[in-house]
Amino acid sequence: MAIVSGMHFERMAREYAGSRPPYPDALFAALRAAGVAGPGLRVLEVGAGDGLATRELLRLGSGVVALEPGQQLADLLAAANPGAEVVHARLEDAILPDTTFDSVVAATSLHWVDLSVGLPKLHAALRPHGWLAVWRTIFGDDSVETKFRRRVTEIVAARQQQDQEPKREERPTMEELAAGGWFDPVGTQHWRWSIYLSTDQVRRLFRTFQ
């Protein structure tokens, strides 16, 4: 699955880099407050893409090592975030030193990872009492009723019925992250926010979905 993902995003690396909307400021404030990111903290980022979260982690003063399996995306990531150490590798293949990181973060990326391999590897890479923070963007608000939203829902439902697979974007769950006893669930938070996208931006965004 991770290989398929990498190939998809690699084929449109520059398109991907300019089309995904940013994460809300409240998320990074929460990471800072929880001691996941901030000055003096060494952070491992899994599947960093073009650096949408990386630049905010750096802005908070974190030392960031960013894993990215796609070569073109890794190049874009490094060029846009010179303060980060970029490693071109999947998590499953990366060689990580033990007890090196204060925290691990994954921004809309851990659903592509084989957790049976990834979770014990992340646990080993973390210092004692280290943190794993996983977040994702879920596009659309079911409480907002529009003609466009209804049509998107119909298209997504038809694709899911054809694929007969669960929504990848809503994984991993807290139960999956706790499987194997490598991590203890602490809590979850949700934020709702709005952004404006032009027709062209919406078209480009939808092209990045796998």
Image (tube, rainbow, N blue to C red):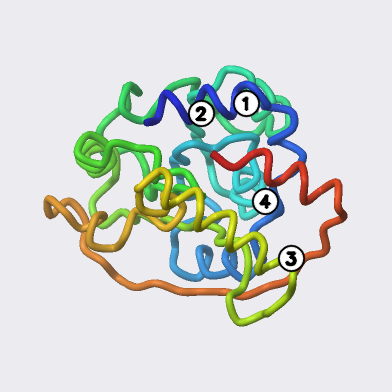
Query: Label 2 belongs to which residue?
Result: 68
Which amino acid type corresponds to the residue marked 4 in the rendered image? Arg
Going 32% across and 21% down the picture, which residue do you hit?
93
Q: Give the distance between the C-alpha atoms of the residues marked 1 and 3, in whole angstroms.
A: 31 Å
Q: Earlier in the sequence, mark 4 or mark 3?
A: 4
Please report the residue visible at 81 percent of the width from the left and 48 percent of the height from the top.
Answer: 201
| Category of crowding for the residue at label 4, using alpha-carbon neighbours closer than 10 angstroms: few (below 14), some (14–19), many (at least 20) | some
Q: CA distance from mark 1 to mark 2?
A: 7 Å
Residue ID for mark 1: 73
User: Residue 46 location in percent, x, y?
Assistant: 44, 39
SS under mark 1:
helix
The image position of residue 13, as x and y in percent, is 67, 27
Q: Are marks 1 and 2 in contact (CB under 8 Å)?
A: yes
Would you call the spot at circle 3 few (<14 residues within 10 Å), some (14-19), or many (20 or more)? Answer: few
Pick whichever of labels 4 and 1 is earlier in the sequence: 4
Q: In the rendered view, tell whether residue 83 sits above or below residue 206.
A: above
Closest to the observer: 5 or 39? 5
Disc 2 versus disc 4: distance between alpha carbons?
20 Å
Residue 126, quarter of the rendered image: top left
Using the image as rendered, state which of residue 59 and residue 50 is in the foreground: 50
Q: Amino acid at mark 1?
A: Leu
* Secondary structure of the residue carrying numbered label 3: helix
Which is nearer the N-term, disc 1 or disc 3?
1
Sequence-wise first label, 2 or 4 = 4
> Label 3: which residue?
148
Q: What x and y, as percent, mark residue 145? A: 68, 79
- Calculate the distance from the C-alpha at mark 4 to the C-alpha at mark 1: 20 Å
**Residue 183 position within the rendered picture, expressed as x and y whole percent measured from the top left:** 21, 56
Nearer to us: label 2 or label 3: 3
The three-letter amino acid code for the residue at tag 2 is: Glu
